[in-house]
């Protein structure tokens, strides 16, 4: 079980969905998984939210599983790599969100 996860919610610029998904799945995710400490990624498409609750950020969610003593270390690795990662202008940066989580238990 990974010690941490980094969750990315991102979507395409309107009208560029096909280009975005192609880049994200064949370029972006493999580049991130090539970084030290990043061990696996799973991706989810948005669906309906519960009535009465805020739908939160829109876009597809990717969960990157990370093995690191401290999630800050993995975030630093990702941040340092950003200038060398292949980016696409089909990514809507205005709606992109990234957040780290630490494992606290399972039931």
Image (tube, rainbow, N blue to C red):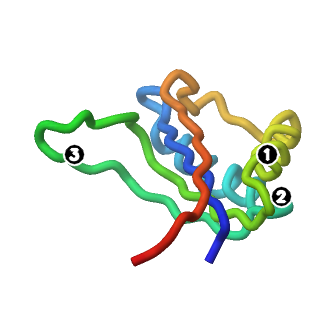
Q: Earlier in the sequence, mark 3 or mark 2?
A: 2
| Residue 68 percent across, percent down from the top left | 78, 63
Residue bearing mark 2: 35
Residue bearing mark 1: 78
Report the side of 91 relative to 18 (left or right). Answer: right
| Residue 70 percent across, percent down from the top left | 77, 55
- Relative to residue 106, is residue 91 depicted above or below? above
Which sits in the foreground, 33 or 106?
106
Query: What kind of element bears circle 3?
Result: loop
- Distance, label 1 to label 3, CA atoms, is 30 Å
- Distance, label 1 to label 2, CA atoms, is 8 Å
Report the side of 63 relative to 33 (left or right). Answer: left
Report the side of 38 relative to 36 (left or right). Answer: left
Q: Answer whether labels 1 and 2 touch (C-beta < 8 Å).
A: yes
Q: Earlier in the sequence, mark 1 or mark 2?
A: 2
Q: Residues within 10 Å of mark 3 (few under 14, many from 20)?
A: few
- Distance, label 3 to label 2, CA atoms, is 33 Å
Residue 49 - label: 3
Residue 30 - label: none
Which quarter of the image is occupied by the C terminus? bottom left
Q: Residue most toward the top?
A: 94
Q: Answer whether labels 3 and 2 touch (C-beta < 8 Å).
A: no
Q: Earlier in the sequence, mark 1 or mark 3?
A: 3
């Amino acid at each position: 079980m990974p010690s941490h996860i980094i969750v990315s919610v991102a979507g395409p610029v309107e009208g560029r969905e096909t280009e975005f998904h192609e880049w994200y799945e064949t370029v972006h995710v493999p580049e991130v998984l090539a970084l030290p400490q990043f061990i696996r990624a799973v991706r989810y498409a948005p669906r309906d939210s519960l009535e009465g609750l805020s739908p939160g950020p829109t876009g597809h969610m990717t969960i990157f599983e990370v093995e690191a003593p401290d999630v800050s270390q993995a975030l630093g690795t990702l941040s340092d790599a950003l200038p060398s990662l292949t980016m696409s202008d089909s990514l809507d940066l205005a709606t992109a969100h990234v957040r780290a989580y630490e494992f606290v238990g399972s039931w």
